[in-house]
Image (cartoon, rainbow, N blue to C red):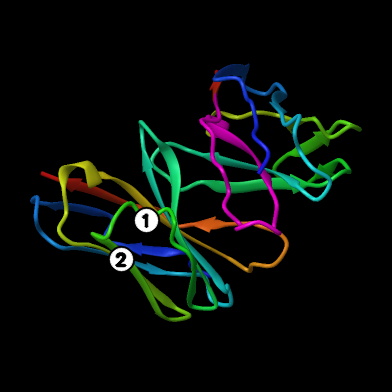
Amino acid sequence: DAKTTQPTSMDCAEGRAANLPCNHSTISGNEYVYWYRQIHSQGPQYIIHGLKNNETNEMASLIITEDRKSSTLILPHATLRDTAVYYCIVFNAGNNRKLIWGLGTSLAVNP
Amino acid sequence: DAGVIQSPRHEVTEMGQEVTLRCKPISGHNSLFWYRQTMMRGLELLIYFNNNVPIDDSGMPEDRFSAKMPNASFSTLKIQPSEPRDSAVYFCASSLGGANEKLFFGSGTQLSVL
């Protein structure tokens, strides 16, 4: 599976948009980009995923570049409850379905 | 739906003792995953089942670890004998399977082996 690179940590002011980048330059054509987050002392929580097109749901938006080598997760109006570690993962269902979890980005939303 | 249910929430045991962690996946999900999380190694997949059959157990650290899924609504992860280095948070997750991998995680079991 393709590897991902994310910043170790980021800060965001409450009420502002949080833009979390992810590089996945070795992604192949049939690999999806998944985002999860883990709030302290909880299990990871699915946020969103996409293949080529931009995606939006009630939690976030996912912007994937045209060459698919990078993506950005956008939390449009960050709240204190969005403070968490955010994981960007590239997944290929044709392989052994083993999600490779990196260290993620620790997002701190400040009042 | 109550989500993925794990028990116990916390487990403290002494080295050499047997530890059994339990998981009830979301009803209708046909894939189940056991993960371990530590500060040093992050989230690691130990084993996953599809339709109750173990598909990939390459992440199981050693023979002290074993996992079973006797039916679609229950799975166990057993460590025998336990060692201090097994101390970690163990997560169970389930999914519908197929081409997409939207996992639903339980709250985890915090294991401390003294």
Snapshot quadrant of residue A54: top right
Q: Which mark is residue B60?
A: 1
Q: Residues within 10 Å of mark 1 (few under 14, many from 20)?
A: some
User: Is B21 inside the magenta-drawn segment?
Assistant: no
Position above or below: A6 against B22: above
Marks 1/2 in contact by CB < 8 Å: the verdict is: yes
Q: Quadrant of the C terminus of chain B?
A: top left
Q: In the rendered view, tell whether residue B44 sits above or below residue B74.
A: above
Q: How busy is the neighbourhood of tag 2: few (under 14 within 10 Å), some, or many (20 plus)?
A: some
User: Does residue B70 appear left or right of residue B105 in this picture?
Assistant: left
Q: Does A18 appear above or below B69?
A: above
What residue is drawn where x is 80% and y is 30%? A69
> Marks 1/2: CA distance?
8 Å
What residue is at 63 percent from the left and 69 percent from the top? B96
Residue holding disc 2: B66
Q: Residue at x 16, y 54 (%)?
A: B82
Three-letter amino acid code at the position of disc 2? Ser
Instruction: Give the percent coordinates (x, y) of residue B50.
Output: 55, 72
Q: Secondary structure at mark 1?
A: loop
Label 2: chain? B
Q: Which residues are magenta?
A: A82-106
Which is more N-terminal, label 2 or label 1?
1
**Considering depth in this image, is A94 or A74 the residue closer to the camera?**
A94
Q: Quadrant of residue B57?
A: bottom left
The numbered dot on residue B32 is: none
Expressed as whole percent of the image width and height from the top left, the position of residue A35 reads: 65, 41
Q: Are marks 1 and 2 on the same chain?
A: yes
Residue placed at 45% from the left, 42% from the top?
A: B43
- Tell whether B81 sits left or right of B24: left
